[in-house]
Every structure is written in C-alpha cells, then in structure tokens.
Image (cartoon, rainbow, N blue to C red):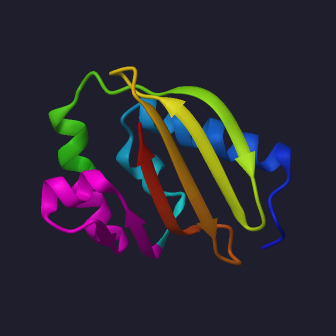
C-alpha cells in the first residue's frame, strides 16, 4: 500500500467513525486484517492482556464493549497521516480524548492498531 494521503486518511476516518457510531460490528471489523493486533490499555483492564490478536478475538472483545456501552459515540477531532499509518483523534461519549493509530498492510487493511486515552 502506498502511504495514505490526507484525502484517503479522511475517508478512512469518516468510514471508521460512522461504523462505530452505528454500532455495526461487521462494518467496524471490515477495516481490519484477519491477523490484526490491537493494543489498548482498556484491553489490559478488561481481559488481562493489552493485546487482542486476530479478527475473531477482536470481534468478541468489541461486541462485549458495544453491548456494555449502548451510549457509545465518537466525535472526530482531527486526522493525522504518517508513512503507512493514520491516526484518528476523537472524543468519546464520556468526553475523553482518544487517539488511535492504524498501521496498514499492502491490501489496505489494518494490521496493527494502537489506542491511547487521556
């Protein structure tokens, strides 16, 4: 995959946020490779490991999170681009600042993602 440009990054962010705000787990997961590695301090708290590895494990992890937080909603702050990565900065339904960085594989799917919270 070529490094994402600003337009491609904005499109990715809009689609990603829309999927989350609709609570559509399949649309959310459509952005990720089967071998995804997701790193998050919330995963550390919820499952005892800061890494969620593989699309099925991620489906289980986020399905539980969506069920537990029916009010969940994200509001875009800004989108940053890097070489082969996109960072989406947003606020969640609790007003918390969040930054998620997505590293892409050649196919355009996310192979590694990092969630950081204020």
Q: Which residues are magenta?
A: 34-61
Residue 40 percent coordinates (x, y) = 35, 57
Is residue 65 left or right of 9 when viewed as pictured?
A: left
* Count of numbered circles in the view: 0
Image quadrant for the N terminus?
Answer: bottom right
The residue at 69%/40% (across/down) is 79
Residue 7 percent coordinates (x, y) = 84, 43
Relative to 22, residue 3 above or below: below
Relative to 29, residue 55 above or below: below
Relative to 56, residue 115 above or below: above
Residue 50 percent coordinates (x, y) = 28, 65
Image quadrant for the C terminus?
Answer: top left
Is residue 49 left or right of 21 when viewed as pictured?
A: left
The residue at 64%/36% (across/down) is 14
Is residue 94 left or right of 4 when viewed as pictured?
A: left
Quarter of image, res 93: top left
Q: Which one is in front, 37 or 17? A: 37
**Does the stretch in magenta take in 43?**
yes
The residue at 85%/53% (across/down) is 5
The residue at 57%/55% (across/down) is 101
Residue 26 percent coordinates (x, y) = 40, 51
- Tell which residue pokes out farthest to the front in this image: 118
Is residue 68 left or right of 109 when viewed as pictured?
A: left
């Amino acid at each position: 995959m070529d490094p994402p440009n600003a337009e491609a990054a904005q499109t990715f962010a809009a689609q990603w946020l829309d999927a989350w705000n609709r609570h559509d787990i399949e649309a959310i997961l459509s952005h990720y490779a089967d071998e995804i590695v997701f790193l998050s301090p919330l995963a550390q708290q919820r499952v005892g490991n800061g890494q969620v590895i593989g699309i099925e494990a991620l489906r289980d992890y986020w399905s539980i999170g969506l069920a537990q937080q029916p009010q969940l909603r994200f509001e875009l702050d800004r989108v940053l681009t890097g070489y082969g990565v996109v960072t989406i900065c947003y606020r969640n339904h609790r007003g918390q600042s969040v930054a998620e960085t997505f590293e892409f594989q050649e196919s355009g799917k996310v192979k590694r993602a990092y969630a950081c919270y204020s």
